Image: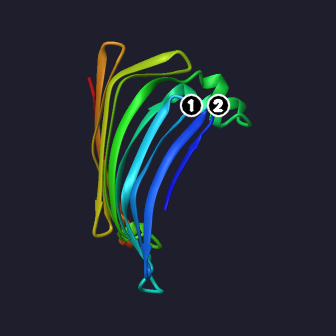
Amino acid sequence: LRLSVSSRDLSYKIDLSVRDKAVTLHALEGRLFNSDFSVSGDTSFEDPEAIDTDVKGYLAIDVSDLRKVFTDFPGIHQMKPAGRIRSKFELSGDIKDLKTCFIDAKMKADAITLYGLKVEKVSFEYVQEQGVAAVKSLRSSFYGGALSASAAIDWMSTGVPYSVKADAF
């Protein structure tokens, strides 16, 4: 199946195939306002108890687009968001139980502005596997200072499931 849709604010192309109980998304690429996205991968419905998925993609988000998408949320307009976030991700596993999925996500931005405050050189790395999620790194520069943080949470733990480390200088 191939489909292309185009309007003033949204355009996308999708190319997918279905065979037995599996869907292959060869490509879903598009643009919403000034933001771009792309996703591809496979999903299997073979096991009725699970939806096994293996996808990867990227997002390039113009943060000011949030005002256009969330028109019913006045708080978004008050934040006056600006900047561009570039991210890529991989997800594999049973998406009916996201805690057990493997997720690798990375995000970068040269600068993001909210409420008139500008954060620069932003980077974020998140990895999740075998029920443990970790913010491997969160870094940014903010008005002459810097922030560096990491965190982890064990989704399967019954005790204290998290740890956090933050440095500001």
- Apparent side of residue 64 relative to residue 67 in the rendered image (left or right): left
Q: Which mark is residue 12?
A: none
Query: What is the three-letter code of the residue carrying label 2?
Result: Lys
Residue 140 percent across, percent down from the top left: 31, 27
Q: Are marks 1 and 2 in contact (CB under 8 Å)?
A: yes
Residue 142 visible in this rendered orientation of the protein:
yes
Query: Element type at marker 2?
Result: helix
Query: Total number of numbered labels?
Result: 2
**Residue under label 1:** 33
Q: Amino acid at mark 1?
A: Phe
- Of residue 131 and residue 151, the one placed in the foreground of this image is 131
Residue at image coords 47%, 73%: 96
Q: To which residue does mark 2 refer?
A: 68
Left or right relative to 166: residue 6: right
Closer-to-camera residue (139/57): 57
Q: Position of residue 87 (x, y in %)?
A: 35, 40
Quarter assignment of residue 66: top right
Decide which of 8, 53 is in the foreground and name it: 8
Query: Quadrant where the C terminus lies?
Result: top left
- At x 54% / y 24%, what residue is drawn? 81
Q: What residue is drawn where x is 65% and y is 23%? A: 78
- Eyeballing the image, is 53 above or below 123? below
The spot of residue 72 in percent (x, y) is 74, 37
Q: CA distance from mark 1 to mark 2?
A: 8 Å
- Tell which residue pokes out farthest to the right in this image: 72
- Give the residue at x 63% y 31%: 8
Residue depth check, mark 1 versus mark 2: number of the one nearer the observer:
1
Secondary element type, mark 1: loop
